[in-house]
Image (cartoon, rainbow, N blue to C red):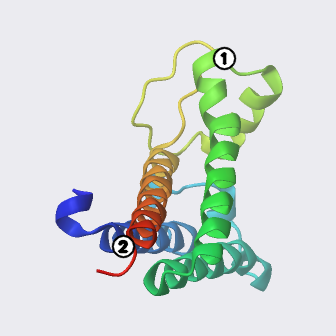
Amino acid sequence: MIRRMGARTAAITCQLALLVYFEVCLLVPLGAWNDQPAMRASFNVSMLILPLAIGVGQLLLLLGSWKQIRWLMWIGLLADSLWLASHIASLWMPYLRGASPQYAAMYARVFSDTTKLLPSHGNHLAPDGMHIVLDVLLLLVILMVAGQLRAMRATAERGPV
């Protein structure tokens, strides 16, 4: 896919998909897909902090990929990797290893009414569908930006044609 599409185009396409998906999920009520306590609360300006912060970060990564600004791409790659790592620790490890009673109580409060794509069993509580798609998009962004950086390095090592 990367060779046919081009590393830069693939990275930008994945980043745009992640940005749009994330912002829609945080700002638009989508029923059980994103039915979390924050979506049920009355609107206040502080609810815009997370979508704005992540949105600005993703826009900066997009700019870095588009203009091929290595240092900006590396910062975005690191930030998205940390974001994915936090989801692995907070959503995927309780599913794979089993949840503590404290996590299970939080899960019941936050994720009980959300769409599940995977089955829960015992204390192995499935991440909600919204976060599964988000994590797949995050992984794609990480892989595509890393691919773009690798392609940029290869081009620089070859020198002018």
Q: Which mark is in front, 2 or 1?
A: 2
Q: Residue under label 1, please give it.
A: 98
Residue type, label 1: Gly
Please state if 7 lies on the left or on the right of 91 as rendered: left
Q: Nearer the viewer, residue 149 or 91?
A: 149
Please state if 136 lies on the left or on the right of 102 as rendered: left
Residue type, label 2: Arg
| Secondary element type, mark 1 | loop
What mark, if any, has residue 133 been given in the picture?
A: none
Q: Nearer the viewer, residue 101 or 91?
A: 91
Q: Residue under label 2, please give it.
A: 8
- At horizontal 47% and vertical 65% (from top left) the residue drawn is 153
Quarter of the figure with the C terminus: bottom left
Label 2: few (<14), some (14–19) or many (≥20) C-alpha neighbours in 10 Å = many
Q: Indicate the quadrant where residue 20 lies.
A: bottom left
Find residue 104 and report its horizontal and vertical position in percent.
72, 27
Give the CA separation, mark 2 to mark 1: 39 Å
Please state if 131 lies on the left or on the right of 99 as rendered: left
- At horizontal 34% and vertical 71% (from top left) the residue drawn is 13
Q: Are marks 2 and 1 in contact (CB under 8 Å)?
A: no
Find residue 79 and report its horizontal and vertical position in percent.
68, 61
Find residue 137 and report its horizontal and vertical position in percent.
43, 56
Find residue 144 and report its horizontal and vertical position in percent.
41, 59
Q: Nearer the viewer, residue 4 or 42?
A: 4
Vertical relation: 128 (above or below) 73 = above
